Amino acid sequence: MSDLEQRIKTIEDRNRNVEIGKAWEVSWTRRILLVVLTYLAIGIYMWAIDLPRPWLNAIVPAVAFVISTLTLPLFKSAWIKVFRVRK
């Protein structure tokens, strides 16, 4: 394989990995996993410090996290539009 062919293969491999990473960032699997882990971490913390109904109260921050992850792309789009106008 020539040097040029090897360089092209390296670039294509890198691009494939970048695309997979981007797909993971916007996947529902990642979002659901983060919600579950957030709920568990907060529930365990609330339980450890002996707050009343820790598992019920842990729902609020987990839901807030979901809302923030779902609305961030909207804010990002708006920010990009404003930023493009400035340039």
Image: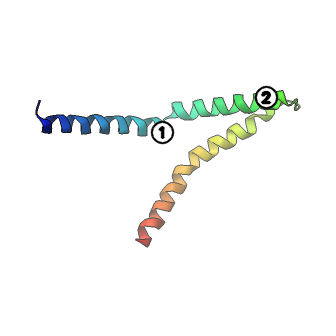
Q: Residue at x 79, y 28 (%)?
A: 55
87 w.r.t. 41: above or below: below
Q: How many marks?
A: 2
Figure quadrant of residue 70? top right
25 to the left or right of 48: left
Where does the image place residue 53, in percent across and percent down from the top left?
Answer: 85, 30
Residue pictured at 88% horizontal, 29% vertical: 50
At label 2, which amino acid type do we have?
Trp
Taking the spot 46% from the left edge, 35% from the top edge, the residue there is: 24
10 Å neighbourhood of mark 1: few (<14), some, or many (≥20)? few
* SS state under label 1: helix
For numbered disc 2, what is the local secondary structure?
helix
Q: Is residue 38 left or right of residue 24?
A: right
Furthest residue in direction bottom, as rendered: 86
Question: Of the numbered discs in the image, which one, if any, rests on residue 55?
Answer: 2
Q: Tell me the quadrant of the picture where the C terminus can be found.
A: bottom left
Q: From the top left corner, tell me how far across and down residue 56 is, in percent.
A: 80, 31
Q: Residue furthest front?
A: 3
Q: Quadrant of residue 33?
A: top right
Q: Give residue 1's mark.
A: none
Give whichever of discs 1 and 2 has the lower sequence position: 1
Residue 30: x %, y % from top left: 53, 33
Q: Residue at x 48, y 35 (%)?
A: 27
* 50, 55: nearer the viewer: 50
Residue 25 disc label = 1
From this view, report whether residue 81 is shown above or below residue 70: below
